[in-house]
Amino acid sequence: MRRALPRWCELLPALLLVAVALHQIFLARTEALSPWSGGGFGMFSTTDGWGARHLHAFALRPGLRRELELPEELIDPVRRALALPTEPRLRALAETLATLPTPDQGPLEAIEIQVFARRYDPVTLAPSGELLRGVVVRFDER
């Protein structure tokens, strides 16, 4: 004889789906999560995927601000930062970038990282970049 599941067990899959959707909406609103990530709710309503975002990183030295080339071996951390540019994630990327050699002289003062999303003017459809999040990670004497 089969025993019937309690009513809450039947609702569990729907409740989990709603919880995932609400968490994704929360992260999209508060942490700039790309709608194409984190569950994908709302992804077809926007072009704002991590591939439509771009990241700029700068090494700051006394009297100098140089944009850094992002090496191929950092493609995964960069993609994660583009999809969900949280401050801890950008700080970790800055720490990694600080270890890379540059042709500049002088002590490294800071690494600045900026993440931009592509936006389109509603009238002209001209693309522009909108700053989603930026951090400056300062370094003491190394």
Image (cartoon, rainbow, N blue to C red):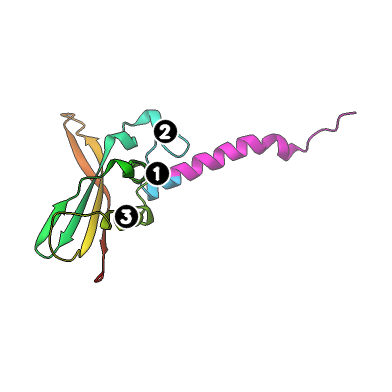
Q: Report how far apart the C-alphas of labels 3 and 1 lie in the structure.
A: 26 Å
Q: Nearer the viewer, mark 3 or mark 2?
A: 3
Of 82 and 45, which appears nearest the observer?
A: 82
Describe the element under mark 2 as helix, strand or loop.
loop
Q: Is residue 91 above or below residue 21?
A: below
Q: Residue 113, percent across and down?
A: 25, 52
Vertical relation: 75 (above or below) 58:
above
Indicate the quadrant where residue 103 lies.
bottom left
Q: Magenta segment, which residues?
A: 1-25
Q: Which residue is mark 3?
A: 96
Give x and y (percent) for residue 9: 72, 38
| Residue designated by label 2 | 42
Crowdedness near tag 1: few (<14), some (14–19) or many (≥20) residues, C-alpha within 10 Å: many
In the rendered structure, which disc, 3 or 2, sits on the residue that comes first in sequence? 2
The amino acid type of the residue labelled 3 equals Thr
Identify the secondary structure beneath mark 3.
helix
Label 3 Cα crowd, 10 Å radius (few <14 / some 14-19 / many 20+):
few
Please count the marks in the image: 3
Between 138 and 118, the one lying in front of the other is: 138
Tell me where residue 20 appears, x and y as whole percent: 53, 41
Q: Identify the element where label 1 is drawn.
A: helix
- Left or right of residue 13, residue 52 in this image: left
Q: Tell me the residue that label 1 is attached to.
A: 28
Q: Count residues near mark 2 (Cα–Cα under 10 Å), then give few for <14, some for 14-19, many for 20+.
A: some
